[in-house]
Image: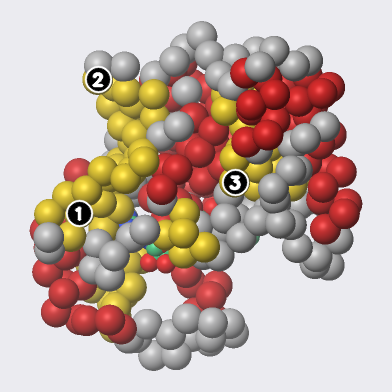
Amino acid sequence: MIPAPFDYVRAASVEDAIRLLSEAGEDAKILAGGHSLLPMMKLRLAAPAVLVDVAQIPDLHGVAEDEGEITIGAATTHAAVAASEVVRRGAPLLAHAAGLVGDPQIRHRGTIGGSLAHADPAADLPVAVLALGGAVTTVGRQGARRIPIDDFFAGYFETALRPGEVLTAVHVPCRPHAAWGYQKFARRANDWAIVGVAANAGRIALAHMASTPVRASAAEQALAEGAGIDAAAASADAGTDPGDDLHADAEYRRVLARVLTKRALLGAR
Ligand SMILES: Cc1cc2nc3c(=O)[nH]c(=O)nc-3n(C[C@H](O)[C@H](O)[C@H](O)COP(=O)(O)OP(=O)(O)OC[C@H]3O[C@@H](n4cnc5c(N)ncnc54)[C@H](O)[C@@H]3O)c2cc1C
């Protein structure tokens, strides 16, 4: 439970972080809230030689709304996202999901950028941003990129982030009147989802049903073609690839995906 030795540097700006990452090379890792990275280091599943802390960079904090889009700085904590009036009004699904992450300590340290970059398929915020049809901005030595969330998750704990790139912002559409629903099935209040379902304006995203957060495409299509909620939810697990673990086997997850999708759609408000 003790990590391997590492150096720690605190970046003052995004440019500073990119320089520090570039100097440290491939053994460096970005540190934000540390609530996923540090447990992995303690278990020796990760052993970076250098941690570049981006959590205090002013430009990575805060929420802004402009021309129908909400932009959230990557180092904004889950608690700040959950409490933001702008997010609560324009993307209530995201505020609600952020309020369900872990417990208060985790929500006051963990960040939205860290959650998306970590890309845990069982996590709350990746699936919420996927259902919202959002995007992320990344900045590296080659400049800035805007990546649609549909193209961001690349595999199990893998994303489209390139080495040395910093995720700087998360963007979601501002749609105060979109119907949304969120269902998280977990054993204890501060656990990750055994299965989670986020639904927003006809998009449906599933947590823990594959190696990445995934869209329930067949259910989305059924809704778009006029199917009722029962019929659409019945196909929620189509095309998914859930795994077995201590909490649930794949077949149970498939049942959960169908039941929770139905509840998310019925409860959409
Ligand atoms: C007990 C416990 C319970 C939890 N329960 C839940 C839960 O119910 N739901 C849930 O969704 N999550 C849960 N989490 C995870 C929590 O939400 C983490 O805070 C989050 O996954 C990672 O955010 P972080 O800021 O802590 O990132 P860190 O741990 O600092 O970093 C995670 C990864 O992202 C990279 N990274 C961080 N920031 C950036 C950036 N700006 N640009 C590029 N790469 C970056 C890091 O290099 C690292 O690889 C839980 C964690 C714990 C310890």
Q: Earlier in the sequence, mark 3 or mark 2?
A: 2
Name the amino acid type tagged 3: Val
Where residue 113 appears, x then y in whole percent? 39, 50
Mark 3 falls on what kind of element? strand
Residue 3 visible (yes or no): yes
Residue at 42%, 43% in the rendered image: 149
Q: Earlier in the sequence, mark 1 or mark 2?
A: 2
* In the depicted structure, whether residue 132 falls above or below residue 113: above
The residue that label 2 is drawn on is 66
Residue at 44%, 90% in the rendered image: 4
Tell me the number on the disc at residue 214: 3
Query: Which quadrant would residue 258 be assigned to in this image?
Result: top right
* In the depicted structure, whether residue 98 falls above or below residue 186: above
Where residue 161 appears, x then y in whole percent? 33, 60
Q: Identify the image quadrant of the N terminus.
A: bottom right
Name the amino acid type tagged 1: Val
The answer as to whether callout 1 falls within 8 Å of ligand 1 is no
Q: Identify the image quadrant of the C terminus.
A: top right
Residue at 77%, 35% in the rendered image: 235
Spot the residue most to the front: 225
Q: Are marks 3 and 2 in contact (CB under 8 Å)?
A: no
The residue that label 1 is drawn on is 139
Mark 2 falls on what kind of element? strand
Mark 1 falls on what kind of element? strand
The answer as to whether callout 3 falls within 8 Å of ligand 1 is no
Q: Is residue 177 left or right of residue 241?
A: left
* In the depicted structure, whether residue 1 falls above or below residue 252: below
